[in-house]
Structures are given as C-alpha cells and as structure tokens.
Amino acid sequence: MGLRVAGLLKASSRLMALTSSSQRLETLLQSGITPMLGNLDKPQTLRRLAGVATHVVHMAPPPLEGYTDPRTRALVLALRLRSLPSAMVYGSTTGVYGDCQGEWIDETRRLQPQSARAQRRVDAQNWINFLGKSGYPRTQVLRIPGIYALDREGGTPRERLLRGTPVLDAQEDVYTNHIHADDLARATVLALWRGCPLRPMNVCDDTDMKMGDYMDKAAAIWGLPKPPRISREQAKLQLSPMVMSFLNESRRIRSERMAQEMGLRLLYPTVMDGLKGKTP
C-alpha cells in the first residue's frame, strides 16, 4: 500500500519512507523514495523524524499482542519533538465497530471493539486524535475493511479456494466489506489535502454481500469449485481462532462521507469489479 500511495504522490512531491529493513533501501530508492531507517518498536530511532515531514501517512499495524498500540504512541511522541507536520492520515480498521449483526452503519456508530486486535486500533486512533486536537497537524483516521488486489500478496481469495477452506452456512453467514488497494491509495492521498480534522472516514466500496456469496462468485470468476458450507459449530472445530474472530462480526459499511467530502469516485465500485480487473 505504501508504494501505491507513493506512486500517486511522487510526481509533485519529495517522498520519504520510514523502514526498519536495510534490505528495502534499494527498492525504495528505485521507486523514487528517500528511505529513512527507523523502527516503531525502538522509539529512540524515531527522533530523526521530528520536523522532517510536512504530510504523514501512517499505515503500520499495531503489535500482535496486547490491548494498546505502542508503535503509534512512539510515532506521535517523536513527531511532537519539533515542528509538527501539516497533515497526518492514519489507516485504522472497520473492526473497531465490532459486531453490528449485519446492520448498515456509518462513522457515527459507537465503537465496540470486541477483539484485542480491534482494541489496539482504537488505542492508535486515540493517539492520532490526541495529536490533532490542537488543530495542528490536521489528522484524519481512515477506517478500512478488507484490502484486496490481484497483484497484492494474499490479496484475493484464490488461495483459500484452492485449499478448499469452508465458509459458513447461508443462515449463519456474515457480511463482508472490501476496498481495492488502488482505491485505498487514492483515498489516502485525498485525505492528506481534503480530509476534515478529527473526522473519521470509512473507506469502503459499494459491495453488499455475505462472505460465502463472495467466495462463490470469486470461484466462478476463476473456474474453481465453490467452497464447502459448514455450520458455525463445525467452523469452531475446523478454522483458526483468527478466522473465527472475523466470522463472529457482521456489518455493512456506509461510505457516503468519502464520496461527499472528498469527492472520491472509486475505480472499483464493487469487489467483483476488482477481481475481474474491470473499471467503469
């Protein structure tokens, strides 16, 4: 996602990217990006960030354990050491809404994180809002569902279909939400300049579909067998706790704010458009 955003910005901007891997330095340089070595898990390495960037995109996930996000905390505190950037965009998750039992929801929905993973994201959002409450920088949180793309590693359900991973029976199935990586990159860039301060935004396509139906339609696109359907009780025995955490939450995300306030027209309005590589 980082390089997708960079591709949209580099024509008119000097770009820098924080990386903890020296092996990525050459890749970033070849993409026209100035790399900066630093590690969000080692706050002392972040001091050089202060006063450098005018616009910041923060998409790094929290650690895999705990209920807080020390990485976002470390970044925020490092940026406060000197003059702050003009704008900052943070990529959160729609998981912060918790289980909405299939209801349509928008950004006014009360947050009800039900997993430690989602609670870490809420903590990160709180740090971003803390940074932006003075009005400088202008901060915006993007709430993002499942990201997909044909050229993204693990970015399509094809491997799951090839493995024959089961899905829930129709009567117990949950709604799923998506955004194509290219549309997410475009939304992120627009948010840097058009985002409203301290106003969260859902970044989601127009798909209204349950998980099993999504997998069935993807199987049809690639000529693969449909996944087997199983009950929720069977799924608890066959699927990992991580997968089950997604199957325990059902919601349909509204994204009118994205279109109305940023004027973003999606390249891939539905997930089927994206899986077929078809734009309007």
Image (cartoon, grey):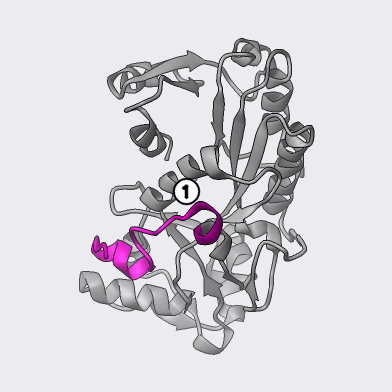
For label 1, the crowd category at 10 Å Cα-Cα, with few meaning under 14, some 14 to 19 and many 20 or more, is many
Q: Quick one: quadrant of the C terminus? A: bottom left
Q: Is residue 258 above or below residue 56?
A: below
In percent of width and height, residue 199 lies at 68, 50
The residue lying toward the viewer, choosing from 136 and 98, is 136
> Which quarter of the figure has residue 235?
bottom right
Residue 270 is covered by the magenta coloring: yes
| Residue at mark 1 | 187
The residue lying toward the viewer, choosing from 238 and 197, is 197
Q: Which residues are magenta?
A: 259-280
In the image, is 31 to the left or to the right of 5? left
| Residue farthest along the left direction in this orientation | 223
Q: Residue at x 71, y 45 (%)?
A: 198
| Residue farthest along the bottom direction in this orientation | 171
> Which quarter of the figure has residue 57?
top right
The residue lying toward the viewer, choosing from 246 and 280, is 280
Q: Is residue 266 above or below residue 168?
A: above
